[in-house]
Amino acid sequence: MANISSPVSEPHAEPSVMARALKEGFFAGLVSLGLFCLFVGVETYQNINNELVWRMRWGLLAVFVGVAAVGRFVNVAFIRPALDKRKLAKAKSGILDVSEDKGFFHRHFLKIALIALLIYPPVSVMLRGVQGSLLLVDNFGIQILIYVMLAWGLNIVVGLAGLLDLGYVAFYAVGAYSYALLSTHFGLSFWVLLPLAGIFAALWGIVLGFPVLRLRGDYLAIVTLAFGEIIRLVLINWTEVTKGTFGISGIAKASIFGIWSFDVGSPSNFAKSFGLPMSSAYYKIFLFYVILLLCMLTAYVTIRLRRMPIGRAWEALREDEIACRSLGINTVTTKLTAFATGAMFGGFAGSFFAARQGFVSPESFVFIESAVILAIVVLGGMGSLTGIAIAAVVMVGGTELLREMNFLKVVFGPDFTPELYRMLIFGLAMVVVMLFKPRGFVGSRAPSAFLHKAKNVSGSFTKEGHG
Amino acid sequence: MVYFVQQLVNGLTLGSIYGMIAIGYTMVYGIIGMINFAHGDIFMLGSFAALIVFLILTTLFAGIPVVLALLVMMIVAMLLAGLWNWTIERIAYRPLRGSFRLAPLITAIGMSIALSNFIQVVQGPRNKPIPPLVNSNYQVLGISISLKQIVIIVVTAVLLTIFWYIVNKTPLGRAQRATEQDRKMAALLGIDVDRTISITFIMGAALAAVAGTMYLMYYGVAVFTDGFIPGVKAFTAAVLGGIGSLPGAVLGGILIGLIESLWSAYFSIAYKDVATFVILAVVLIFKPTGILGRPEVEKV
């Protein structure tokens, strides 16, 4: 503020900036010393007698405090003035650098992305061989696409209808367990159970929807969280059916519409039928296309629904519930359909997950998963499908990448396990992204039905037929 | 009957711990309208701080009186948890205060994930057991009450009295209540709103740290995942009692503690958490603002 009103004093401000930076750096060091003195400075471990003992870690503590102090100093002394200067220069030039005509990449982003996804498995096979493509297709491709699908499903509830759902993973669990149980007990195939799992999850969505119809905002959040926990606890404790924490293993694989199967012993094995060398990679490539298809279905349904009265009603509900009700929209059915539709896609994703893993256990359906999915929706910019997909790639792909960073072992010694830091970095990334982009990567939340320009309906317009 | 009263005592102990955590949730919610998801992890940090202080005390000053040790553990845990919550508020919540509703919720969830994993990284993933601090038992009319339970209930009662005094009788409490009612108006009347909010976070964290110390003393073990379940239960307690209401938080905490211990005593231990959550849902269906919550009047 002071900068704008008296730009003349800027050169004189130089020493005081340094002094302030020193002070703030010192203060940050002091605070971080307080924060970390016990948790980082003292290591607790069990000795041979199984007693808990401790020792100091001065070096590590010094590193933490030093980084905090120096980081704060550099930020205040150099980064922030530079940013301010840039902002000032931009404001002076007076031209907003928003250009209407976007580049080729921007305009055809969706087509390019779709083509890239379609050729992703063949390319990764070419690059790394059949067996080597497993990592790329399974750990990155399928993993990310599952989250994209879950986030798009949750987006219907949170992004479109504005109902905060912290227990979305429950529907994922319902889908996964319905596939696991029905296929192991009744031998039904994936393609029969996929829609069934969706229907079951949708029913559970309605079951959850009923009690929370009268709740709003944060009360809704806690009840949905409780619902997610209830489902998980039932899965753990109802051992006769779900086998508890052991989980259900040996779930049948999906087949290519019953024509080719991926079971090794089966006569119609895919690799055998085509005379290819045996590998589990084909199954993963097939699954990649299945989940891609499911994602496309989710996106298609979402986009179409937004154009339909029900989608408009969801968006109206999100913007203002009272106005919505006074305009005669039935908020009960609106909320229930939002829950059911969102849950259905969760169920699809769940049954896909069970088919992919061949194993389900309550471990996979903890609250953190719900939080991660919600984070992807919000970080992507609620309501924007592209933004959510980008967020999923960044957040899930980024943390998956961490698993593969073995070169870090060279830097930090052989005991260094990057996986350990995966969730720590994920949590911090959530905070950092939110701080810099509070509206998400693609921050558009305008309702689909929106009057972009206030039209001037004057006599001259109506005469020409513009009205 | 004796069995029933025994369960009541156990439930009350557990409920006191939940109630102390719930106050942090409900105060923060009341004053800035956000769910501080990281609060459960602040509780966990408090319990770890107490654990580390306990280890240092027992090795450096062997034979220290238990009362003194507990007091030092509690005070250090309160200070550290307060500092952590203050820092988190400054870094992750304050810049987003004017932003849309879900933004601080997401940073809070991110902080919660980061905090528990931070402890996992720096202190290891294993359970940290400590030898029992106090282990005398008293028999009153056939009911066995351990000294631990008495300590927990007494500490809770004392702290809640102090807390009630601060909120209701001091200028600081007045500032807090004013900020809660209308932040802009409070600022116009000369209340330093930022400072008041910071102090609220510190106070909530201090209570959570005491709860953490008590939890450590009661169960004798700390682990990095400790923040989640008690955190969720305490939040449930806050909602059950009516979020934003301080007596409601304590009442909700005690109710949840009682439901939990009575359910495990008479029905099944496995489904005690399910029972808690189902009762929460049922209460909210019939009374959507919780037991002591003010009915929301929506103005258009």
Image (cartoon, coloured by chain):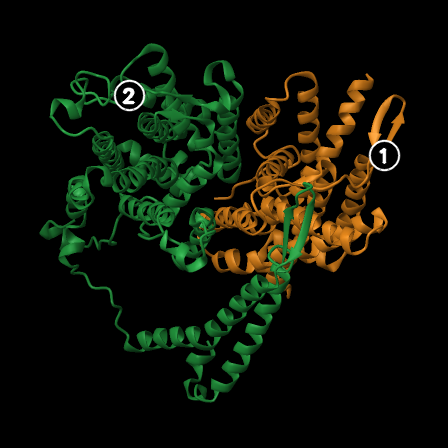
Local crowd size for mark 1, using a 10 Å CA cut-off: few (<14), some (14–19), many (≥20): few
Mark 2 element type: helix
Q: Nearer the viewer, residue A199 or A250?
A: A250
In percent of the image, x 70 and y 49: which residue is there?
Answer: B50
Q: Name the residue under label 2.
A: A195
Marks 1 and 2 belong to one chain:
no
Q: Please, what is the three-letter code of the amino acid marked with disc 2? A: Pro
Colour representing chain B: orange
Q: Kindly tell me whether residue B247 is visible in this rendering.
A: no
Horizontal side of B161 relative to B291 (left or right) equals: right
Q: Which residue lies furthest to the top in this view?
A: A186
Q: The green chain is which one?
A: A
Q: Where is residue A436 in the image (x, y as percent from the top left)?
A: 40, 59
Q: In this view, does A463 lie above or below A243?
A: below
Q: Is residue B187 above or below residue A454?
A: below
In percent of the image, x 47 and y 31: which residue is there?
Answer: A363
Q: Please, what is the three-letter code of the amino acid marked with disc 1? A: Ser
Mark 1 element type: loop
Horizontal side of B263 relative to B34 (left or right) equals: right
Q: Which chain carries label 1?
A: B
Q: Where is residue A418 in the image (x, y as percent from the top left)?
A: 43, 50
Q: In this view, does A370 lie above or below A453?
A: above
**The disc label shown at residue B136, or none:** 1
Q: Which chain carries label 2?
A: A
